[in-house]
Image (cartoon, grey):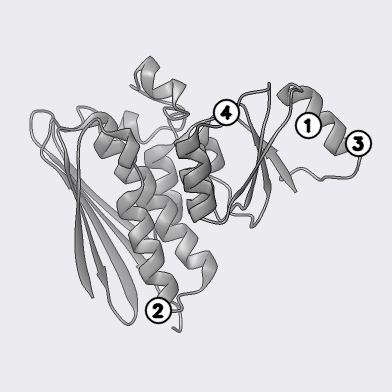
């Protein structure tokens, strides 16, 4: 299942396990939120590159960071079309 | 088990440190994953609130055989209208805070949703003291 948001407060309202978080938020807070929500995959959109601090933190917490040049809308649509289900 | 963690106002680089340490402890104690998530998400929301809105404070965690009690206490300035702050979508967050992905106005409502019992003491000009209780069903 996938969930797309730039607002970590919205991500924190989900209780589903191990979803793909698709976000344009490329900072430590995205990794922290993933840690709290048991999310192990973050897809960062709009070609934003994670900082070294963010990569280090993700490494330590065993969280994978993926980047794409596509927009949040486009990549969400593509993944949905290929079978990734929405959380709600 | 009793532990407390200081939380500094305004320092988002360490946001989540207290919640992260509590998560590690709960994992070691074999608390069910969904219960851990509820505890940690609520604690993280409260921790971010202290950093974002208060003069600083601490997170106090007490783990007992049948329940986990997390208290989040700050030194002020208190919440002027608690009922409004409990409303989903209501937020007083700064633009800086929103850029970091917070400030959706879901913090306190989400804390309430995830805890089995929530007590809040607050008053404008005073401090805020949140007590969250999570039952460990059958554990």
Q: Which badge, 4 or 1, is on the more N-terminal residue? A: 4
Secondary structure under tag 4 reads loop
Separation of marks 2 and 3 at Cα, in angstroms:
41 Å
Residue occupying image coordinates x 47% and y 47%: A57
Residue B29's tag is 2
Q: Mark 4 and mark 2: span between their CA atoms?
A: 33 Å
Residue tagged 3 = A81
Q: Is residue A4 above or below residue A34?
A: above
Report whether residue A88 is seen.
no
Q: In the image, B126: left or right of B52?
A: left
Residue B78, percent from left and from top? 16, 33
Q: Residues within 10 Å of mark 2 (few under 14, many from 20)?
A: few
Gap in angstroms between the C-alphas marked 4 and 1: 13 Å
- Residue position for label 1: A76
State the image coordinates of residue A61 (x, y, percent, origin top left): 51, 55
Give the Cα distance between marks 3 and 1.
8 Å
Q: Residue at x 38, y 56 (%)?
A: B20
């Amino acid at each position: 299942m996938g969930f797309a948001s730039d607002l970590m407060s919205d991500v924190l309202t989900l209780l589903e396990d191990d979803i793909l978080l698709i976000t344009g938020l490329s900072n430590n807070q995205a990794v922290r939120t993933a840690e709290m929500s048991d999310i192990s995959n973050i897809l960062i959109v709009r070609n934003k590159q994670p900082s070294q601090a963010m990569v280090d933190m993700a490494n330590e917490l065993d969280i994978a960071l993926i980047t794409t040049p596509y927009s949040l809308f486009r990549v969400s649509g593509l993944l949905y079309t290929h079978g990734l289900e929405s959380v709600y | 088990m009793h532990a407390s963690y200081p939380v500094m106002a305004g320092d988002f680089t360490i946001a989540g440190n207290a919640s992260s340490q509590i998560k590690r402890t709960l994992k070691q104690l074999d608390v069910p994953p969904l219960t851990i998530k509820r505890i940690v998400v609520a604690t993280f929301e409260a921790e971010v609130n202290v950093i974002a809105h208060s003069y600083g404070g601490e997170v106090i965690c007490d783990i007992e055989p049948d329940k986990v009690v997390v208290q989040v206490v700050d030194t002020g300035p208190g919440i002027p209208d608690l009922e409004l702050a409990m409303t989903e979508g209501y937020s007083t967050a700064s633009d800086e805070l929103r850029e970091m992905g917070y400030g959706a106005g879901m913090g306190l409502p989400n804390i309430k949703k995830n805890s089995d019992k929530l007590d809040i003491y607050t008053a404008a000009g005073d401090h805020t003291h949140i007590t969250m209780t999570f039952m460990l069903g059958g554990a």
